[in-house]
């Protein structure tokens, strides 16, 4: 359970990082 939660947190963190990079690249 904790491992799944940690994995979801890491995936969401990388997803938000990629989204921010795309937004910064567009501007």
Image (spheres, rainbow, N blue to C red):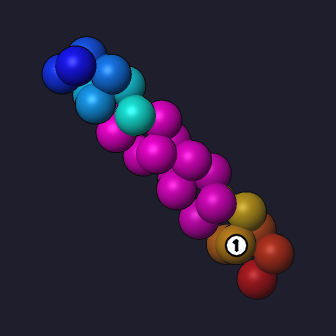
Residue in view at x 48 percent, y 35 percent = 11
In the picture shown, does residue 9 fall above or below 15?
A: above
Q: Is residue 20 left or right of residue 4?
A: right
Residue holding disc 1: 23
Q: Is residue 24 left or right of residue 16?
A: right
Q: Which residue appears farthest toward the bottom when viewing the image?
A: 27
Residue 7 lies, in percent from the top left, at 37, 25
Q: Which residue appears farthest toward the right when viewing the image?
A: 26
In the picture shown, does residue 8 fall above or below 18?
A: above
Q: Secondary structure at mark 1?
A: helix
Q: Is residue 18 left or right of residue 12?
A: right
Magenta span of residues: 9-20
Residue 6 lies, in percent from the top left, at 27, 28
Q: Nearer the viewer, residue 9 or 26?
A: 9
In the picture shown, does residue 3 fall above or below 9?
A: above
Does 6 lie within the magenta span? no
Q: Nearer the viewer, residue 26 or 9?
A: 9
Does 12 lie within the magenta span? yes
């Amino acid at each position: 359970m904790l491992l799944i939660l940690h994995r979801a947190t890491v995936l969401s963190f990388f997803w938000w990082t990629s989204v921010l990079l795309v937004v910064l690249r567009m501007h």
